[in-house]
Amino acid sequence: MIGTIHTDQKCSLCNSKFRDNKKNALVCSKHPEQTANKFRVYFRGVSKRFKSYNEASRFLTGIRFKTDENTFDARDYRENNPLGFKNLALQWLRLKEKTVKHTSFQSIENHISKAIAFLENTNVKDIKPKDFQLFLKSLNLTDKTKHNYLSTITQFFKWLYDNEEIDRLPKFPKQSFELAWRKTIDKDTQQEIISEVYRISNHINPKIWIGIRWLSIYVNLRPAELTNIKEGNIDLKQGEIVIPNPKERKPKIVFLLKEDIELIRSFPIAMPHLYLFRHTPGLSGVRAGSRFGPRYLYKWWKKACSNLGIYDVDLYGGTRHSSVRALRKYRTPEEIKMASMHSTNKAFERYFQIESDHIRDIYKDAQRGTKGGKEVAKDFKRL
């Protein structure tokens, strides 16, 4: 039969090797009373130590059975645990770091680190759907964030499958969630805020106002994509900006309005490697020429809102979201979706909230054929 039980020990009387009696011990053929007390199983590249013959025998029987059912994998038994979740996840992170943006990698690394803390170095082939369920339950996070964690783990297991580390993908639990609705404002209020941004910031850096204004016009732009634009990404002859590293991972172009082309031309010519939205000299705590930080425009937006007594409206909701909603008066949903470059209906629906006037019209239609409000009021007076 395949596989054997060995020992490095020898008979203390004649120095002969111990042999497996195929029953319950490793013994000396000349002195049967002499037996081994340390054991090692050798089986197709597997070498594993045991403290008793029975343990070694049960292990050998088990892997012989796995061989018969064609599920034996020598990697499952190696001491360095090459199929351990932690070992493979760290390998994946090293590769992933070179293929995604830094901010995306930070999220991925956080997700995987939490999973490593929970699953430790469990063999990836032994991880069951219940383990994923228990992991998600251990996270004191929103359903949307749990969904993101599960998405990262799914990516990791897909990588394992593609690289033939596992023969099949595990069954992942479903983690449903509802996208939150952002608070929006009407266009008049939006323009008031943008005008206030101009008043309080134009003397410091006109690009603060320009950046926030652009977010309200070019509804396919995200704040992080805006501040990532470099001078070399701008083609004034074509009137276009090619967005570097967009979230959608496919080409994204901003087609500038004529007034914005002229606005950019009014600034001194700069080197292609410089960020368009960069700090001017003389500001405390920032280096001249450095890119706007991720919350820089947000801070100016909130300051302008506070000056006007407007609260609970963030930069994204007050610019892009509010503009998309206002476009409903002039454009079809299909046109708006094309301009905003939403890749899924679910994400688009969060931006494209139905108008209250439209709802009222529906209610009026529902009222047709029934008594109107004034007639109902008369009936109550008669009672």
Image (cartoon, rainbow, N blue to C red):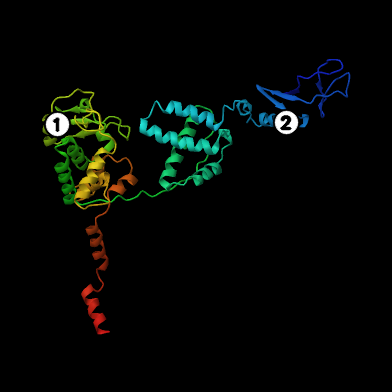
Please provide percent x and percent y for residue 181. Answer: 32, 51
Quarter that holds the N terminus: top right
Compute the Cα span from label 1 to label 2.
Answer: 77 Å
For discs 1 and 2, the disc positioned in front in the rendered view: 1
Quarter that holds the C terminus: bottom left
User: Residue at image x 81%, y 20%?
Assistant: 18
Quarter of the image where one finds residue 236: top left
Please provide percent x and percent y for residue 259. Answer: 11, 36
Secondary structure of residue under mark 2 = helix
Q: Amino acid at mark 2?
A: Thr
Residue at mark 2: 61
Residue 312 drawn above or below residue 240: below
Identify the disc placed on residue 299: none
Using residue 341 as the reference point, say whether residue 125 is left or right of it.
right
User: Residue at image x 25%, y 76%?
Assistant: 376
Instruction: Name the residue at the top extreme.
Output: 15
Residue 299 drawn above or below residue 370: above
Please provide percent x and percent y for residue 111. Answer: 45, 37
Residue 147 visible within the image = yes
Dot 1 or dot 2: first in sequence order is 2
Using residue 165 as the reference point, say whether residue 316 is left or right of it.
left
Instruction: Name the foreground residue: 361 vs 153.
Output: 153
Q: Amino acid at mark 1?
A: Ile
Residue 2 visible within the image = no
Identify the disc placed on residue 264: 1
User: Residue at image x 65%, y 21%?
Assistant: 45
Instruction: Name the foreground residue: 159 vs 334.
Output: 159
Secondary structure of residue under mark 1 = helix
Quarter of the image where one finds residue 10: top right
